[in-house]
Amino acid sequence: MSAPSSSETDRTDPPARPGPATPAEPADLPAHSDGFIRGLSQAIGGPVGEHAVNPAARRSRFWTAPRIIMALLCMTLAFSWVQKSPCQDGNWQENVQYTRFCYTDVLALYYAEGLNEGKVPYKDHAVEYPVVSGYFMGALGLPVHELGEKYPEINQGKWFYNANALVLSLLAVASGAVILALRRRRPWDAAIFALSPILLVTTTVNWDFLAIGLALLGMYAWTRRWPLVAGLLLGLGGAAKLWPLFILGPLFVLALRSQRFKPFLLALGGAVFAWVATNLPIAVLYRTSWNRFFELNDTRPIDWGTFWYIGRFLDSKWNSGAPGDQGPFQWLSDNIPTLNHLSYALTVLACAAIGLLCLLAPRRPRLSQLAFLVVAAFLIFSKVWSQQYVLWLLPLIVLARPRWGAIIAWTVAEIGYFTAFYAELLGAGGKPVIPEGTFVLASTLRLVTVAILAGLVVREIWRPELDVVRHTYDDDPDGGPFTGTPDAPWTVGIRRWLNLDRTPAPAPAPADTTS
């Protein structure tokens, strides 16, 4: 008899849903499991000893790990509001929005999208965002305009920004709560999210937390084995910002490996229904306005800080950029349709490689690992990488690879890029603040650190014994309907044919000496 694969041996494991830690399954302690935190803990005497009081036994205490983390998250969001406060009144004289690092699209677009004039998104003004974001803008902006008409003395822009800041912060709090719910045995992982400087500077730059909150709630619904609800939430998230729909790709490949297609088809159907239901009214009634988002993405040039921007800068060191004297990136900059096709092709190839990795890995990868890789690949090859897109990656990397050291290094690179980006915006007025090469260096460090994080996630997929989440959970805590299911026989056969099955062969039976 052939040896069962590692995934086949999971057949007898009970399906594990995220649940509260018990004395038999103690909560993870970062000072023991994370080398970076273990090193820092030496300053206060080292990790907690084995004879210390077990925190889980102190059921009466108020400040449990989840409550501490939620309090820290609220503190970070409060500081974020303070950090953006110099820009709230809209009096952006002498480039205060750049010198104080407080620029926000939310306030700028209140006027640019005509909300201050009472224009209904899509009906009276073509909006550059997907429809759920447009609905959200109108749901908050139009009442503020009506209030301003009744009380002319109020600052409409400030009221609009603060209303959005409140709702976006609540969505950020909900996102933190979902991370805690997904990692109940590893609550301190959520502290990486709660204390992130990334939240401090980008939470209210745009409406990204609308999509993030919906995507994470969709992942939670999947974990609870509610695939239709998960699909509806992912579809709504995709109608706010496109990227939550990318999570359907990992779900499909995981369905292939587990040979459980019904939950995936339910999720897919829910996502399609939610996306169509939110988009169809606008597409039918205001087709030109609905097309605006897609047309803008087709025609936008290479954006600051992207892989293509870096390449064009390097081309300029050897080529003038004039016709006949162009490097490949300079040429692509002048041929946007070709750039679009190349960007999409590279993203699709990267996703195909991620899918192949999922099928060939020794154990079925975790959903959050694949989701992070897909979103990271999209950003690396995209021609647009706005400053707030970093928020897409933050909760996913916390779920995929909750190791403090690498995430802190990436955060430093992101904050460095954030600073250089604002210096570049100041220099756009004609007086450079930093050399162009400095901005390109900051862009390169951002891209490289994201690529390194992706490489580390790939490494832990290929060597699951390095995955700290698997040290706490027997199976994928985000697996939902896939948890505890065996691999499809054909995937087992392929891994054996390629000699990738690392499960040792069973020991031979002892010889019968009784005869």
Image (spheres, grey):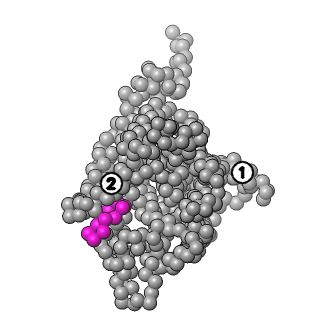
Residue 8 picture location, percent across and down: 44, 33
Q: Tag 1 or tag 2, which sits nearer the N-term? A: 1
Q: Image quarter for residue 80?
A: bottom right
The image quadrant of residue 132 is bottom left
> Can residue 126 be found in the magenta stretch?
yes
Relative image position of residue 192 (x, y in whole percent): 60, 57
The structure residue drawn at horizontal position 41% and vertical position 60%, both measured from the top left corner, is 211
Q: Secondary structure at mark 1?
A: helix
Q: Quadrant of the N terminus?
A: top left
From the viewer's side, name the closer residue of 121 and 132.
Answer: 121
Q: Residue at x 50, y 77 (%)?
A: 90
Q: Residue furthest left?
A: 284
The residue sitting at 30% across, 69% down in the picture is: 125
Q: Which residue is mark 2?
A: 295
Badge 2 vs badge 1, beta-carbon distance below 8 Å: no
Q: Is residue 507 above or below residue 69?
A: above
Q: Where does the image place residue 463, in percent across and percent down from the top left?
A: 56, 35
Labels 2, 1: front one: 2
Q: Is residue 303 magenta?
A: no
Would you identify the image quadrant in which residue 109 lies?
Answer: bottom left
Q: Look at label 1 and name its amino acid.
A: Arg
Residue type pointed to by label 2:
Glu
Q: Which residues are magenta?
A: 122-132
Q: Residues within 10 Å of mark 2 (few under 14, many from 20)?
A: few
Q: CA distance from mark 2 to mark 1?
A: 50 Å
- Does residue 13 appear in the picture of this structure? no
Q: Which residue is mark 1?
A: 38
> Toward the viewer: 383 or 219?
383
